[in-house]
């Protein structure tokens, strides 16, 4: 395992480099993985590979019909459950209906560069969906988690204002799609950091990790607010991006490799936009333990979800 940012790989018997791909995933028979947003994009690609490796994969999706259609396209053990991360009542309903161990909780679902809007609970849509929904879901499910939580962030955490607007989390009066998206992705990394701190302090062996897909061609880009941005992203998808299977590799890497808690995985090539997964660095803002603790406390107040006393320590 290399924590310097170099791609983790091994050698074949003939001495050639054996790059990390989905074929390196170990046998996951008897294990359960919950994947939010598993009906499309990198979530679906990750679900396919986890099921192929023997895991029972739970599609946690907003649209049951689309989730069932996606699950029907793949082989392996799957089930589909409704989860709307933009509605805390739906998050609580999902958690209350859960029973049994969760080996892997993969916080994958997200929205990107949307026009200004609000979740059902009144939060700015991108922050509310990408961060607060997953924050509440993780804390509510944590007593069932036995191995790790993987949260999908983005290289966009380095963009925008590079800070959490604690005084104005909804960005009232200063909203811009990129600012909101960057804040939500920075929040994902700060959440991962503080979650690992709390797991360690509680004596749990559960790990919190993060991943980013680089530039992956998914349907997220088609929902951006600005038509010019949408056009540029469409062109980037054709020229720079890797496909959703490639974009899912850092998530799978973080979910199945023996990595330290708090690790951040991403592509190793083309400025972190594509290529073999590896451990990558994060911005100074994403390493700020004081901001991470403050965000956690604010998120508890906003969602009513708190770090549980009964955390699996297996």
Image (spheres, rainbow, N blue to C red):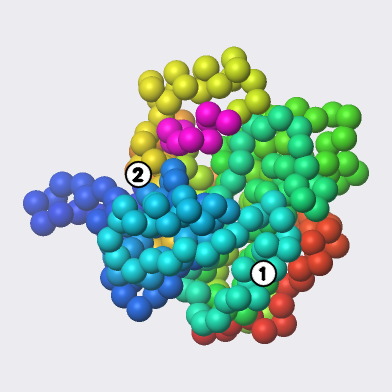
259, 24: nearer the viewer? 24
SS type, badge 2: helix
Which numbered tag is attached to residue 245? 2
158, 30: nearer the viewer? 30
Q: Position of residue 40 (x, y in %)?
A: 44, 46
Q: Position of residue 21 (x, y in %)?
A: 29, 50
Residue in the picture at 71% in, 77% down: 308
Real-space Cα separation, disc 1 to disc 2, in angstroms: 31 Å
Q: Name the residue beneath numbered marker 1.
A: 93
161, 244: nearer the viewer? 244
Residue 311 picture quarter: bottom right
250, 41: nearer the viewer? 41
Q: Is residue 142 visible?
A: no
Residue 117 picture quarter: top right
Category of crowding for the residue at label 2, using alpha-carbon neighbours closer than 10 angstroms: few (below 14), some (14–19), many (at least 20): many
Image side of residue 113 versus residue 314, left or right: right
The residues colored magenta run 215-223
Residue in the picture at 58% in, 53% down: 62
Which numbered tag is attached to residue 16? none
User: Outermost residue toward the front?
Assistant: 65
């Amino acid at each position: 395992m290399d924590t310097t940012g170099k791609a983790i790989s091994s050698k074949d018997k003939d001495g050639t480099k054996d790059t990390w791909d989905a074929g390196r995933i170990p046998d996951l028979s008897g294990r359960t993985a919950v994947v939010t947003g598993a009906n499309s994009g990198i979530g679906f690609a990750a679900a396919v590979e986890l099921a192929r490796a023997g895991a029972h994969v739970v599609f946690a999706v907003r649209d049951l019909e689309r989730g069932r259609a996606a699950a029907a396209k793949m082989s392996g053990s799957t089930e589909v459950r409704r989860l709307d991360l933009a509605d805390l009542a739906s998050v609580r309903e999902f958690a209350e209906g859960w029973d049994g161990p969760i080996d892997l909780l993969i916080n994958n679902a997200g929205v990107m560069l949307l026009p200004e809007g609000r979740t059902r609970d009144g939060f700015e849509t991108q922050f509310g969906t990408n961060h607060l929904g997953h924050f509440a879901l993780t804390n509510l499910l944590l007593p069932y988690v036995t191995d790790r939580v993987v949260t999908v962030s983005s290289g966009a955490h380095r963009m925008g204002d590079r800070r959490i607007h604690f005084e104005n989390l909804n960005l009232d009066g200063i909203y811009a799609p990129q600012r909101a998206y960057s804040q939500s992705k920075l929040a994902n990394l700060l959440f991962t950091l503080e979650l690992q701190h709390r797991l360690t302090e509680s004596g749990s062996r559960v790990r919190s990790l993060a991943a980013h897909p680089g530039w992956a061609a998914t349907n997220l880009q088609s929902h951006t607010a600005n038509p010019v941005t949408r056009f540029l992203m469409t062109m980037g998808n054709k020229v720079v991006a890797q496909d959703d299977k490639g974009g899912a590799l850092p998530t799978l890497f973080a979910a199945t490799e023996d990595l330290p808690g708090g690790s951040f995985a991403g592509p190793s090539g083309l400025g972190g936009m594509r290529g073999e997964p590896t451990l990558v660095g994060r911005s100074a803002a994403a390493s700020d333990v004081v901001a991470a603790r403050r965000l956690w406390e604010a998120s508890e107040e906003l969602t009513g979800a708190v770090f549980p006393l009964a955390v699996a320590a297996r």
